[in-house]
Image (spheres, rainbow, N blue to C red):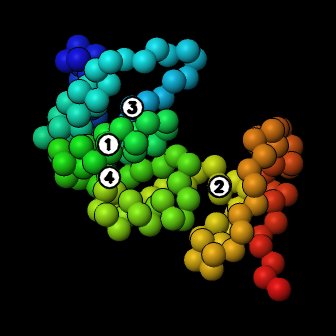
Amino acid sequence: MVNRARLLLETVDAVIDEIGAQKTGVRLSPFHRNLDMPFQADTEETYLYVAKALNEKGCVYLYISLENDTIPSGLLNKIRQVYHGVLIAAGGLTRDSAEYLLGDNLIDVAAFGTPYIANPDLVERIRHDWPLTQVTREAFYGGGAEGYIDFPPFQPE
C-alpha cells in the first residue's frame, strides 16, 4: 500500500514545493476499472492512507470520482473522517444525490461534468427542477459542431 501510494505522494510533494499546498488539489478514482484494471483487495486501506497523507500535507482539495462502489462501500464517509480540506465529488450525481451528500456534510462541492455537455443550462435546470436532456456519448467531441453546440437550453412553457 505504501509503495503503491509513493509515486503520487512524491509528486504531490514536488508540486507543493513549487506552488504551495494552498494551490494543490488531487483527484482520486478509488474504484475505477478502466482498461481491465483488476480489483485490489486493499483499495479502501490504500485510499484512506492517501487521503490522510494529503490532509497532513495541507492540500487544498481532494476530488473523489464516485465510480462504482465509492458510496456503497462507505469509503467516502471514511475519507471525510481523515481528510479535512475541501472534498469534491463527481460522477453520476443527480440533484438528489448531490443534495444528500452536501446535506450530510460528506462533501463540500458537488461537481457535474458530463451532464453539462447535454445541458448547457444545467444550473437553471437543477434550480427549477426542469428535466435534463439525456446524454448521448456518441455525439461528444466528434470533430464538428454536433455534440458541442447543438444541445438547446430548456424552454419552459
Looking at the rendered structure, the number of numbered marks drawn on it comes to 4
Question: Residue furthest toward the bottom?
Answer: 157
Compared to residue 79, the image places residue 4 above or below, namely above
Residue 116 visible in this rendered orientation of the protein: yes
The residue under label 3 is which amino acid type? Answer: Pro
Disc 4/disc 1 C-alpha distance (Å)? 15 Å
Disc 1/disc 3 C-alpha distance (Å)? 12 Å
Which mark is first along the chain, 3 or 4? 3
Disc 4/disc 3 C-alpha distance (Å)? 14 Å
Disc 4/disc 2 C-alpha distance (Å)? 20 Å
Compared to residue 149, the image places residue 28 above or below, namely above
Q: Quadrant of the N terminus?
A: top left
Which residue is under mark 3? 30
Disc 3/disc 2 C-alpha distance (Å)? 22 Å
Q: Does dot 3 land on a helix, a strand or a loop?
A: loop
Left or right placement of residue 94 versus residue 4 in this view? right
Which residue is under mark 4? 87
Name the residue: 49% across, 38% down.
67
The residue under label 1 is which amino acid type? Answer: Gly
Which residue is under mark 2? 115
x, y percent for residue 71:
40, 44
